[in-house]
């Protein structure tokens, strides 16, 4: 038998005690990670917050339920169907984009898409109307990401189409440029 010129590696031979110590250490890491998870119930009820510029305290996005909308609902009231916060103009303070419609008992009432900012006091104010309910459109997919508002607008090709079942759609985006929200049409997804 030829002797190795390497040093004796007997200390690298694993024993059951080594495996037990490793398993115990791994179990402790997994248990600690489980204990440090955020409480999902607390985060779901917390309003979205954005950090303002220059290290100031976080600012809450405007609450769309507290705003007054330019929407005529013949005494039925309105419903905030969808909402998303985001810093749309890059000033470090979040705005809220709200999809609002009349609280109708049936059918698909037209929607308005409004941009809200913090007003004086606690009441948010509407600073832009992106979709006017008079256009007779409803809103499908809706998102606010990286200062861009995107939505799928659903409409009707004629007055003969039932108001429950829109037969036209258009994918659009809005982005703050030069002091106004600029609307662009997104290309339709190809079926190939």
Image (cartoon, grey):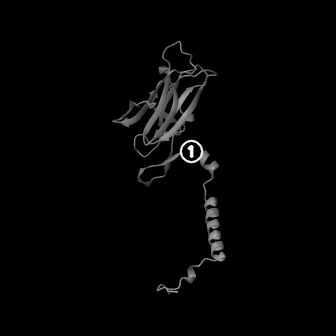
**Residue at position x 55%, y 26% from top?**
101
Look at the picture and state if 42 lies above or below 74: below
Residue 181 horizontal side relative to residue 98, left or right: left
**Residue at position x 57%, y 82% from top?**
11
**Residue at position x 64%, y 66% from top?**
27
Which residue sits furthest left?
A: 178
Q: Nearer the viewer, residue 110 or 126?
A: 110
Residue 117 percent location from the top left of the image: 47, 37
Residue 65 percent location from the top left of the image: 57, 34
Residue 178 horizontal side relative to residue 151, left or right: left
**Taking the image as drawn, is residue 96 in sight?**
no
Dot 1 crowding, Cα within 10 Å, few <14, some 14–19, many 20+: few
What residue did someone put label 1 on? Answer: 47
Find numbered disc 1 in the image and state the secondary structure of the residue it sits on: loop
Look at the picture and state if 56 lies above or below 68: below
Q: Nearer the viewer, residue 13 or 161?
A: 13
Residue 41 percent location from the top left of the image: 64, 48
Residue 181 horizontal side relative to residue 49, left or right: left
Residue 63 figure quarter: top right
Residue 16 percent location from the top left of the image: 66, 75
Residue 164 figure quarter: top right
**Taking the image as drawn, is residue 171 in sight?**
yes
């Amino acid at each position: 038998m030829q002797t190795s010129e390497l040093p004796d590696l007997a200390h690298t031979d694993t024993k059951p005690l080594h495996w037990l110590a490793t398993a115990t250490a791994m179990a402790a890491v997994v248990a600690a990670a489980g204990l440090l998870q955020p409480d999902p119930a607390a985060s779901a009820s917390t309003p979205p917050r954005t950090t303002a510029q220059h290290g100031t305290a976080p600012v809450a996005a405007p609450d769309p339920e507290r705003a007054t909308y330019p929407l005529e609902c013949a005494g039925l009231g309105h419903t905030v169907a969808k909402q998303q916060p985001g810093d749309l103009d890059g000033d470090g303070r979040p705005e809220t984009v709200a999809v609002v419609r009349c609280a109708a008992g049936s059918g698909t009432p037209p929607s308005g898409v409004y941009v809200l900012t913090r007003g004086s006091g606690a009441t948010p104010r509407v600073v832009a109307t992106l979709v006017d309910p008079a256009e007779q459109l409803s809103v499908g997919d809706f998102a606010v990401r990286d200062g861009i508002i995107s939505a799928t607008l659903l409409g009707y090709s004629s007055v003969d189409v039932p108001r429950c079942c829109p037969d036209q759609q258009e994918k659009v985006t809005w982005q703050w440029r030069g002091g106004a929200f600029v609307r662009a049409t997104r290309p339709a997804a190809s079926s190939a």
